[in-house]
Image (cartoon, grey):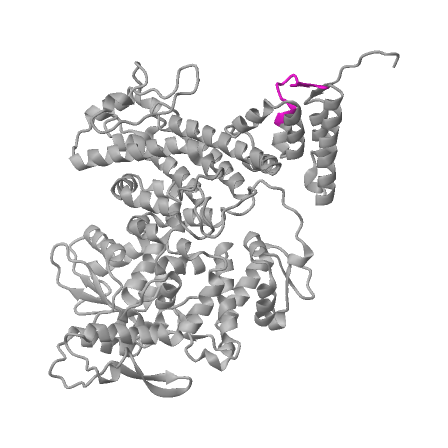
């Protein structure tokens, strides 16, 4: 070249633009070629830098580092940092950029952290510092809530991911970050302690205000509104110091006064900005979520950090106040409730009071939270992942292939093909679930028996006649868990007691009615009457079927010699119920739940009650109101043409399908109409039509029912409006108990 000097420029139009051209269609390439091209890009960058290439942005301001991070190319980022160390902090700051995909940033930082222990600790410490700064900005009431909240949680998620995949991951149940050990690894959390300290003081301050029980918090609010957490030019604020009680002047970091609309949205303050809890709850809850994530990433899977449990117990009243004021906080930030039963029990009554639709959305959001990003490229189905089943032996062949399949892959998606057929897709999957739901209750397998009314199914206590019964129960649990995971409805309805078993809810004597209405009536009679002088001579033992032979089974140790009295009859009824509804089928229940929990975590399914679980699994049953009217009888003074009856049916036709199901459950104890319609509804003594009986009206009187004879006791309301109001109150707030006619 005749001694000429040549300059080269490393910019986004050279190496990384080549990256765009050469790797822009990476979703079409095999993993092997992907690795080759990643190495090729790294090598190209290294050659250019060795030859003195300059690091410049293109005309749009896009740098080589920008494009490398966008593509998740950690090796090339490593090369760039080797030649330009200042780019390390640039990558750390990129974690705050919402325009960059989080999984790509994780990929880059994961690669960089694996290079050495010192690099790993440096990345974590830097991320902790950025998270702390963002957390303090979030606690500044003048900052934009939505932007700061997303930024903080994004950085903390990346921090926790890098921490977990580090060279020395936590083991042996030791909380390495918070158990007092002064290891280099535990020190990466030190910058965050400033944020946790601020959080703790905020909550103590609010608890103090709650204790004062002041209706007007004008004084504290007016001072809070003076706080400015960020300078007008956008520079970072110093670490935020929350006040101690009585020192509210420390909240102000500036002399100006913020306007209410600077508080980050309508949800954070009332119109007059007088409610400090409304202004701070969402911000503090987001920091609590970040705190939980940092505590959890140091613990082995399935364990909750003792420090976090202690934190929740300490601030229990304030957290409940937050949730009561704005229940949406549960769904947005208090994810720890789903992963820690000890904490969930404190808030369960609040959770279950939330709308069914909101809980469904929360359920699926967290059920699928660990799966690949929705914007990831979908690859063709691997032939080995297809469930190949035989139509002529669909139950057994499906059981075999599902038991061998990878659970993680089944959670992500299902591909089914029938042997000898070419069809695949969602239509085939739906058909597969539909056929299997019928096969599960096929009498040939002896797994389930019909309830007394013939519309629902209960595990068969004699299923042991099938040698593979427990394996099949496990498979049945897998199928229902898979169906729920993928929002596929199954054509099967269980007894209320079995739904309770799935949810971990104790059964009661009223549940016995589904399998033996007469026995349930006898138990009810015992509870309702004084048995002291009746000479029943009952003991705490009952005769029951044990592997085909009738045996006397004690309800508790020494039960055969313990008489049932007026004082202990409630215990007797409960123990009899548990024997018939739980102990008699405990192995079957355990096997079913083993399969079900492979796809549905127990903590998540607890969001629902037994009625809602039926809707999730089997959908809303269709009710033909015309058929209902045709097969209804009237008694105690009512006739079909009476105004109250006319109003009643007009109300039934006008309410929602869900409320019609509640009405059917309220009167008959079942949400299902039997095959053949309302003419085939069963009562305690055989076929029994839906019946409406007149009851004298008194103000505020609610309708009642006797489920053993399918009777609705409807007061003679003076107007349609009052009838509708009282009926809906009974449906939504009434019990589903068994009463005597």
Say left or right for 525 vs 624: left
- Image location (x, y in percent) of residue 502: 40, 63
Residue at horizontal 29 percent and vertical 39 percent from the top: 322
- Tell me if residue 132 can be seen: yes
> Observer-nearest residue: 575 or 179?
179
- Answer with the quarter of the image where residue 575 lies: bottom left
What is the magenta range? 53-66
- Answer with the quarter of the image where residue 326 lies: top left
Using the image, determine if residue 557 lies above or below residue 637.
Answer: below
Say left or right for 435 vs 322: right
- Image location (x, y in percent) of residue 582: 35, 72
Reply yes or no: does residue 193 show up in magenta: no
- Image location (x, y in percent) of residue 583: 36, 74
Using the image, determine if residue 392 lies above or below residue 563.
Answer: above
- Tell me if residue 491 can be seen: no
Using the image, determine if residue 717 lies above or below residue 740.
Answer: above
Going by the picture, which residue comes out furthest to the right? 2
Say left or right for 214 vs 307: left
Residue at horizontal 48 percent and vertical 72 percent from the top: 441
- Answer with the quarter of the image where residue 68 lies: top right
Give the mark count: 0
Residue at horizontal 27 percent and vertical 63 percent from the top: 736
Looking at the rendered image, the quarter that the C terminus falls into is bottom left
Looking at the rendered image, the quarter that the N terminus falls into is top right
- Image location (x, y in percent) of residue 127: 49, 31
Reply yes or no: does residue 57 show up in magenta: yes
> Observer-nearest residue: 709 or 544?
544
């Amino acid at each position: 070249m005749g001694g000429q000097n040549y300059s080269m420029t490393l910019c986004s139009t050279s190496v990384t633009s080549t990256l765009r051209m050469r790797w822009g269609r990476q979703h079409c390439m095999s993993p092997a070629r992907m690795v080759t091209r990643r190495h090729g890009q790294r090598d190209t960058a290294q050659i250019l830098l060795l030859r003195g290439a300059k690091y410049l942005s293109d005309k749009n301001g896009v740098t080589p580092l920008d494009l490398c991070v966008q593509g998740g190319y950690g090796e090339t980022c490593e090369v760039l940092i080797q030649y330009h160390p200042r780019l390390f902090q640039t990558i750390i700051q990129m974690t705050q950029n919402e325009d960059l995909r989080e999984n790509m940033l994780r990929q880059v930082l994961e690669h960089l952290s694996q290079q050495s222990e010192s690099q790993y600790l440096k990345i974590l410490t830097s991320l902790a510092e950025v998270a702390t700064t963002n957390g303090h900005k979030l606690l500044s009431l003048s900052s934009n809530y939505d932007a700061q909240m997303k930024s903080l949680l994004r950085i903390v998620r990346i921090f926790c991911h890098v921490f977990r995949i580090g060279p020395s991951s936590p083991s042996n149940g030791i909380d390495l970050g918070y158990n007092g050990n002064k290891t280099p690894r535990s020190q990466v959390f030190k910058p965050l302690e400033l944020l946790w300290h601020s959080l703790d003081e905020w909550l103590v301050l609010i608890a103090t205000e709650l204790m004062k029980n002041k209706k007007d918090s004008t004084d504290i609010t007016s001072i809070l509104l003076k706080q400015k957490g960020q300078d007008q030019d956008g520079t970072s604020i110093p670490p935020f110091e929350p006040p101690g009680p009585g020192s509210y002047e420390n909240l102000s970091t500036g002399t100006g006064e913020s306007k209410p609309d600077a508080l980050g949205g309508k949800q954070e303050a009332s119109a007059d900005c007088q409610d400090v809890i409304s202004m701070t709850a969402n911000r503090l809850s987001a920091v609590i979520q970040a705190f939980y994530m940092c505590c959890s990433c140091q613990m082995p899977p399935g364990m909750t950090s003792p420090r976090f449990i202690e934190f929740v117990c300490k601030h229990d009243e304030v957290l409940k106040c937050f949730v009561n004021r704005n229940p949406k906080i549960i769904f947005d930030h208090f994810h720890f409730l789903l992963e820690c039963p000890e904490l969930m029990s404190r808030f369960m009554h609040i959770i279950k009071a939330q709308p069914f639709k909101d809980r469904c959305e929360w359920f699926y959001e967290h059920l699928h939270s660990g799966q690949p990003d929705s914007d990831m490229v979908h690859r063709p189905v691997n032939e080995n992942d297809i469930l190949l089943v035989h139509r002529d032996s669909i139950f057994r062949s499906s059981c075999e292939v599902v038991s061998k399949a990878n659970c993680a892959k089944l959670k992500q998606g299902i591909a089914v093909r029938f042997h000898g057929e070419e069809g695949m897709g969602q239509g085939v999957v739906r058909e597969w679930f539909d056929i299997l739901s019928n096969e599960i209750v096929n009498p040939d397998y002896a797994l389930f028996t019909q309830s007394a009314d013939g519309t629902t199914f209960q595990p068969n206590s004699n299923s042991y006649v099938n040698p593979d019964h427990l394996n099949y129960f496990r498979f049945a649990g897998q199928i229902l868990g898979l169906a729920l995971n993928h929002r596929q409805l199954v054509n099967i309805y269980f007894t209320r007691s079995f739904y309770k078993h799935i949810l971990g809810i104790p059964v009661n004597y009223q549940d016995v009615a589904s399998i033996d209405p007469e026995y349930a009536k006898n138990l009810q009679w015992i509870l309702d009457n004084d048995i002291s002088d009746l000479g029943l001579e009952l003991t705490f033992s009952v005769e029951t079927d044990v592997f085909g032979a009738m045996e006397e089974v004690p309800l508790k140790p020494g039960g055969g010699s313990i008489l049932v009295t007026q004082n202990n009859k409630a215990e007797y009824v409960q123990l009899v119920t548990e024997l018939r509804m739980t102990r008699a089928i405990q192995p079957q229940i355990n096997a079913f739940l083993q399969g079900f929990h492979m796809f549905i975590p127990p903590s998540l399914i607890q969001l629902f009650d037994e009625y809602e679980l039926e809707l999730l699994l089997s959908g809303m049953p269709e009710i033909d109101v015309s058929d209902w009217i045709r097969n209804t009888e009237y008694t105690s003074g009512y006739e079909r043409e009476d105004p109250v009856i006319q109003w009643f049916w007009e109300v039934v036709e006008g309410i929602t399908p869900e409320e019609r199901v509640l009405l059917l459950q309220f009167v008959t104890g079942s949400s299902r109409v039997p095959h053949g319609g309302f003419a085939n509804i069963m009562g305690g003594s055989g076929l029994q039509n839906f019946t409406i009986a007149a009851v004298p009206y008194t103000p505020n009187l609610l309708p009642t029912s006797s489920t053993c004879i399918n009777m609705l006791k409807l007061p003679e309301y003076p107007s349609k409006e009052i009838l509708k109001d009282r009926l809906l109150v009974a449906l939504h707030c009434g019990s589903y108990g068994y009463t005597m006619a």
